[in-house]
Image (tube, rainbow, N blue to C red):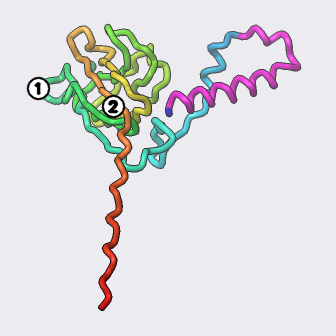
């Protein structure tokens, strides 16, 4: 969902920039990097960047502690098994950590704290920070801390396809015997 919102934002932004530049050919070759900085940010009621547009009905939140005291270079638990539509909520209990999706300590840009933007930068947050991400596609998502990946600070989110509950057959009313 976050990715879809991001792409939609970029699409609108690109269309806007194109319209703005159509009367000015000299700036048509301007560095495309500059356009990304104007991306629209969607924030929730607390002013935090909304990680996704909505929360699924019946979905759950799974908590992961980032760098708990005494085990600072770890995510606890380091593996969570969830279903499509569920949200993982990471809470920082020590300083200088990130949640960055990717394998082999290389960001893949699927999600990252604090706001799913510039994942390559490996932005770090401190104690008390909370980052949430709602997973909308099944799969295995590996992530790491940008600063401590090489110390083994990695985690996995396994996202199972949503299971549609079977409709329970409605019992037929037994016809009443009339005297
Ligand atoms: Cu870390």
Q: Nearer the viewer, residue 29 or 7?
A: 7
Specify the segment rendered in magenta: 2-30
Q: Residues within 10 Å of mark 2 (few under 14, many from 20)?
A: some
Q: Position of residue 163 (x, y in %)?
A: 35, 40
- Seen at 32% across and 88% down, the residue is 178
Ligand 1 in which quarter: top left
Q: Secondary structure at mark 1?
A: loop
In the rendered image, residue 107, in percent from the top left (x then y), is placed at: 40, 13
Q: Residue furthest bottom?
A: 179
Which numbered mark, 2 or 1, is in the foreground of this view? 2
- 173 lies left or right of 70: right
Name the mark on residue 160.
2
Snapshot quadrant of residue 7: top right
Instruction: Give the number of the disc on residue 91.
Output: none
**Numbered disc 2: secondary structure:** strand
Of labels 2 and 1, earlier in sequence is 1
Q: Which residue is mark 1?
A: 70
- Whether the magenta-drawn stretch holds residue 4 is answered as yes
């Amino acid at each position: 969902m976050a990715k879809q919102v991001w792409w939609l934002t970029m699409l609108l932004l690109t269309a806007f920039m194109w319209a703005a530049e159509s009367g000015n050919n000299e700036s048509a070759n301007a560095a495309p990097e500059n356009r990304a900085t104007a991306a629209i940010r969607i924030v929730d009621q607390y002013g935090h960047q909304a990680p996704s547009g909505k929360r699924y009905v019946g979905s759950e939140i799974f908590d992961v502690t980032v760098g708990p005291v005494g085990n600072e270079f770890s995510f606890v638990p380091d593996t969570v098994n969830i279903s499509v539509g569920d949200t993982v909520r990471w809470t920082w209990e020590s300083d200088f950590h990130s949640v960055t999706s990717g394998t082999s300590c290389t960001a893949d840009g699927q999600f990252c704290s604090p706001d799913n933007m510039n994942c390559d930068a490996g932005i770090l947050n401190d104690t008390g920070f909370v980052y949430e991400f709602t997973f909308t596609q099944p799969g295995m998502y590996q992530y790491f801390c940008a600063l401590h990946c090489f110390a083994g600070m990695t985690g996995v989110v396994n996202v199972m396809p949503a299971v549609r509950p079977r409709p329970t057959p409605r019992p037929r009313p037994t016809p009443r015997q009339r005297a």
